[in-house]
Image (cartoon, rainbow, N blue to C red):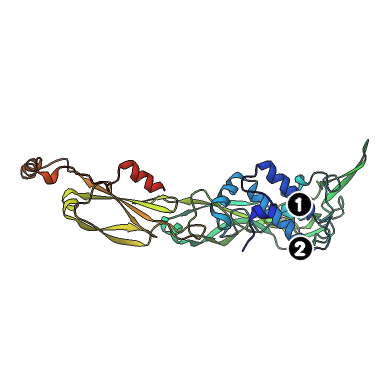
């Protein structure tokens, strides 16, 4: 079981953005590769702290984590957390270390397999949208999507960048009143990869890449919501040289169901019945995400009655069961009557059986709304 992100950073759930950043900086410096060369445990803690900060520093990701926990980032690699490597961490959060390590630079992941200081460039991310039906959302689904992505062309060869010597960075030493300060910057000649193209085929671009179509399998967990974003690691564009591929970001869109409306994990269905059906009672077949279900309506049922079918809603994203299907009963009043029908209702106007006699157990409209949202 994954550790709680708040526990990793040693903060409470009510921590401010500034407190989150401060706590991450403290952990990052404690487990930084330059302070713990060759320490596998420190490397793991360094990555965990970065993963926790990536989620808790983003208001949208933090809100989903607070509501669903780690389950919010499962499926197809997650919604943003997890699968971070050292290159991701330094490229995204390196500025947080401030001047703690050589004036803002770092020595190439000492002991972390960084290749002697060479920085691995990450390819660009790709973004797609996937439409899901309510049934697919309720049960989870595997989607196979064709994606056009840039991949390394065959026959491309590289040579070490002469500007940075293959390190991907150039260092500069400046004399200041405080002493000699060393700073590091990405090499402009190779873009930080440490390599430049030696030979490439005619169908490759300036970075040695070409467009290729690939079928990508995306596992979408049950319970996702419209607007959520999944991440499929390493299925974005390739990076030049020995870089790391970017990610495929999948935005979720939901198709509107003809009769069912979603509210969180619950579903709502409007059922219309006639006056005679309400008086005599009946049984009705209604839509549900697993197919049709039949429900029984007792004689004398009132308009506005809400029937709750437990477990017939959407599977919870955090794995805590399923929501309910709420059936809203509406008695349909005819607008036009023939003479025989009109005569019947006129005779019933003063009949005591047709006089409204609400019982104490009959809840008001506001009580029903309160129950529905509780």
The x, y position of residue 337, in whole percent, is 11, 42
Q: Seen in the image, is 249 located left or right of residue 36?
A: left
Question: In this view of the protein, can residue 334 be seen by the observer?
Answer: yes
Residue 30 point in image, percent of width and height? 79, 53
Residue 99 placement (x, y as % from top left): 83, 44
Q: Please identify the quadrant where the N terminus is shown.
A: bottom right
Q: Secondary structure at mark 1?
A: helix
Residue at the spot 13% in from the left edge and 44% down from the top edge: 354
- Which is nearer the eye, 136 or 241? 136
Q: Residue at x 72, y 48 (%)?
A: 23
- Kindly give the residue lying farthest to the front in the view shown: 360
- Residue 202 visible (yes or no): no
Rendered view: 341 above or below 298: above
Q: Residues within 10 Å of mark 1 (few under 14, many from 20)?
A: many
Determine the secondary structure under disc 2: helix
Q: Dot 2, crowdedness within 10 Å: few (<14), some or many (≥20)? A: few
Q: Contact, CB < 8 Å: mark 2 with mark 1?
A: no
CA separation in Å, label 2 and label 1: 13 Å
Query: Which residue in the structure is indicated by mark 2?
Result: 41
The answer to whether residue 265 is left or right of residue 187 is left
Residue nearest the viewer, comparing 224 with 147: 224
In which image quadrant can residue 77 be found?
bottom right
State the image coordinates of residue 16 (x, y, percent, origin top left). 65, 42
Report the residue marked by disc 1: 28
Q: Nearer the viewer, residue 372 or 121?
A: 372
Instruction: Name which of mark 2 and mark 1 comes first in the sequence.
Output: 1
Horizontal relation, residue 149 to residue 303: left or right: right
Q: Quadrant of residue 104?
A: top right
């Amino acid at each position: 079981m994954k550790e709680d992100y708040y526990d990793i950073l040693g903060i409470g759930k009510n921590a401010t953005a500034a407190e989150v950043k401060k706590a991450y900086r403290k952990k990052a410096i404690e487990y930084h590769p330059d302070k713990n060369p060759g320490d596998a445990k420190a490397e793991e803690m360094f990555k965990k702290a970065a993963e926790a900060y990536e989620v808790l520093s983003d208001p949208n990701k933090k809100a989903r984590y607070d509501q669903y926990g780690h389950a919010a980032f499962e499926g197809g690699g997650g919604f943003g957390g997890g699968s971070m490597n050292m290159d991701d961490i330094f490229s995204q959060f390196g500025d947080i270390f401030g001047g703690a390590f050589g004036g803002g630079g770092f020595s190439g992941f000492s002991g972390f397999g960084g290749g002697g200081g060479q920085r691995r460039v990450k390819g660009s991310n790709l973004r797609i949208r996937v439409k899901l039906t309510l049934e697919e959302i309720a049960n989870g689904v595997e989607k196979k999507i064709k994606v056009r992505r840039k991949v390394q062309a065959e026959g491309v060869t590289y040579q070490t960048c002469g500007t940075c010597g293959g390190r991907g960075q150039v260092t500069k030493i400046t004399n200041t009143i405080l002493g000699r300060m060393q700073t590091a910057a990405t090499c402009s000649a190779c873009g930080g990869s440490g390599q430049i193209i030696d030979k490439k085929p005619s169908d490759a671009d300036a970075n040695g890449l070409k467009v290729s179509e690939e079928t990508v399998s995306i596992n979408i967990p049950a319970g996702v919501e419209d607007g959520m974003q999944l991440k499929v690691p390493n299925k974005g564009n390739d990076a030049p040289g020995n870089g790391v591929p970017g990610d495929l970001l999948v935005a979720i869109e939901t198709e509107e169901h003809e009769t069912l409306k979603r509210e969180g994990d619950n579903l709502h269905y409007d059922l219309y019945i006639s006056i005679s059906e309400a008086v005599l009672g009946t049984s009705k077949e209604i839509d549900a995400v697993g197919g049709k279900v039949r429900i029984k309506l007792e004689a004398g049922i009132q308009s506005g009655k809400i029937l709750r079918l437990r477990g017939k809603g959407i599977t919870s994203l955090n794995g805590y069961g399923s929501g309910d299907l709420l059936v809203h009963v509406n008695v349909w009043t005819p607008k036009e009557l023939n003479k025989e029908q009109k005569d019947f209702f006129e005779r019933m106007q003063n009949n005591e059986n047709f006089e409204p006699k609400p019982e104490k157990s009959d809840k008001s409209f506001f009580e029903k709304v309160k129950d529905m949202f509780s």
